[in-house]
Image (cartoon, rainbow, N blue to C red):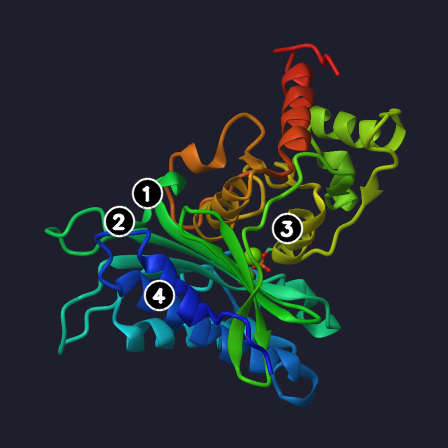
Amino acid sequence: MSTAITLGQFIIEKQADFPYAKGELSRLLRDIAIAAKIINREVNKAGLMDILGNAGSNNIHSEPQQKLDVFANEQFISALKAGGECCIVASEENEDIIIIDPPDRKQGKYIVAIDPLDGSSNIDVNVPVGSIFSIIRKSNDVDPCALSDVLQKGHMQVAAGYIIYGSSTMLVYTTGKGVNGFTLDPSIGEFCLSHPDMHIPEDGNIYSINEGHYVNFPKGVKQYIKYCQEEQHPTRRPYISRYIGSMVADIHRNLIKGGIFIYPATASSPEGKLRLVYECNPIAFIIEQAGGRASNGHGRILDLEVSGLHQRTAVFIGSINMVSQVERFLKEAAGLASIDN
Ligand SMILES: O=P(O)(O)OC[C@H]1O[C@](O)(COP(=O)(O)O)[C@@H](O)[C@@H]1O
Ligand SMILES: [Mg+2]
Ligand SMILES: [Mg+2]
């Protein structure tokens, strides 16, 4: 029986860090954890349930929706509706925002953007998948909720996190005061503090990129991969290529061991593949809070203008020295600088 601090206890304890807090954000994080536990229950026995495979529908990205994508989306939306602290849900699985305006009580003041199930291509093959969430505050208390409330820059986030459904299930989150990880203890059904004050090493030797797209990569990215494969570096040798294909799982590994996760713009996806509002901004907030760097190759992800709910961006996220180095390769390739390794 675990005696660790539970997520609920930790959230209440940390509320003291926010003098004006009235508990709304704490309750919102609780609602997200409830949805995560229900999704975890289904993921854990997915093979036994009729929850594997295609849902027979496509999402806004013309990607086939997996049954678990739909199930996870429904769990988050209903938990956020029931909790009442959220006024808008923006989801990867819904083309438009969902406005929550309960008839019987005051509308919530937070916006939650979610990737309900991350790593969908790995669901049926029992490889770790995740969920990602980003929380921002409504831009003002006067105007009715609108899409513009969602399209705020990443540095406006008040909290962000992910859940990884792997050999154990963990919830990792930040409220802008460091990053903490909680492991779900099935015997008590609680997330318990297992990874306090997480920090990503400044340097690492793991690079995560889908090299299957190599021919379509920008020149600077190709040069960086070549560097990792060939160039002799006193401290980082050898580099290890690791790619799970679930962003949450690749990021989680690198957060603990050090490393860089790259999903660049390619000839086939000139904007990149991963979505800014509910994948890259929340992950960038976590990694920066853990001492890492999150870039689109030319600048900070969290400072990017947000013009669309499903906007995509190139991402270079991880150990600060590794991300700075690949940025130099990109600058060099664009003839803007010389590599002074
Ligand atoms: O198969 P690819 O092109 O490498 O893409 C894998 C990437 O796509 C994703 O699966 C996209 O996320 P979703 O599964 O939420 O759509 C990421 O988790 C992952 O990093
Ligand atoms: Mg995703
Ligand atoms: Mg998804």
- Amino acid on which the number 2 mark rests in the picture: Asp
Q: Where in the figure is residue 149, as x and y percent of width and height?
A: 26, 49
Could you classify mark 3 by the number of other residues whose Cα lies within 10 Å: few (under 14), some (14-19), or many (20 or more)? many
In what element is the residue under mark 2? helix
- Amino acid on which the number 3 mark rests in the picture: Ile
Residue for badge 4:
12
- Amino acid on which the number 4 mark rests in the picture: Ile
Do the numbered discs 2 and 4 sit on residues whose CB atoms are within 8 Å? Answer: no
Q: Residue at image x 70%, y 84%?
A: 47
Residue for badge 2:
149
Tell me the distance, in whole angstroms, between the alpha carbons under discs 2 and 1.
6 Å
339 lies above or below 40: above
Q: Where in the figure is residue 191, as x and y percent of width and height?
A: 52, 72
Do the numbered discs 2 and 3 sit on residues whose CB atoms are within 8 Å? Answer: no
Q: Tell me the quarter of the image containing the N terminus.
A: bottom right
Q: Describe residue 197's horizontal placement relative to residue 81 as left or right.
A: right
Mark 1 or 3, closer to the camera? 3
Q: Earlier in the sequence, mark 1 or mark 3?
A: 1
Q: Nearer the viewer, residue 93 or 45?
A: 45
- Amino acid on which the number 1 mark rests in the picture: Gln
Q: Nearer the viewer, residue 209 or 283?
A: 283
Cβ of mark 1 under 8 A from ligand 2: no
Q: Tell me the quarter of the image containing the C terminus.
A: top right
Q: Which mark is residue 152?
A: 1
Q: Residue at image x 63%, y 88%?
A: 49
